[in-house]
Amino acid sequence: MLTTPTLGKIEAIVHGRIRALLAERVGNVGPLSGAEKLSATLGLSSLDLAFLVAELEAQLGVDPFAKLIPITSIRSVNDLVEAYRKALAPDPKMAGQDEELAAAMRRGRQRRTAKVRK
């Protein structure tokens, strides 16, 4: 995607994909609540979730579960929306923390390499 979608757009896309998936099974589905549980309330299986994530990746151009978020932490519709929001518009404060972590890891590698050479 060329531009980052807004939270409202991400939510609309995620809700639309879930409704389309449910419509294939049970027919027309009404509006979704963000608090609805994907498995317990909506009846989605792990295979359904995998299919849904593949469709969302194709549509949004990002897979938040590759590195950012464990798929096992996704329980509700809101969790899924938030995962894509984080992947598409990461918090700039967190980016600084990631750079600090990377710098600390580099320093540690340099210290270990220096000890090995001695």
Image: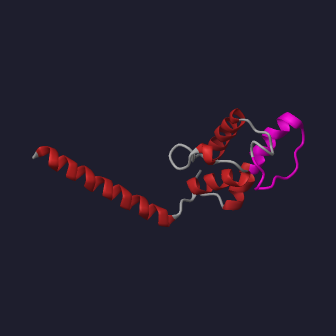
Vertically, is 63 above or below 82? above
Closer to the camera, 87 or 80? 80
Q: Is residue 69 magenta?
A: no
Residue drawn at the location 69% of the way across and 48% of the way down: 75
Q: Is residue 3 visible?
A: no
Vertically, is 4 above or below 27? below
Q: As drawn, is 106 to the left or to the right of 25?
A: left
Vertically, is 9 above or below 42? below
Q: Residue furthest left?
A: 118
Q: Is residue 102 visible?
A: yes
Question: How many labels, in total?
Answer: 0
Percent x, y of residue 21? 78, 39
Residue drawn at the location 62% of the way across and 48% of the way down: 73
Closer to the camera, 13 or 105? 105
Vertically, is 32 above or below 52? below
Q: As drawn, is 69 to the left or to the right of 102?
A: right
Percent x, y of residue 51? 68, 35
Q: Quadrant of residue 8?
A: bottom right
Please say which color scheme the image uses. Answer: secondary structure
- Give the residues drawn in magenta, as a range: 15-37
Residue drawn at the location 15% of the way across and 48% of the way down: 115
Residue drawn at the location 15% of the way across and 44% of the way down: 116
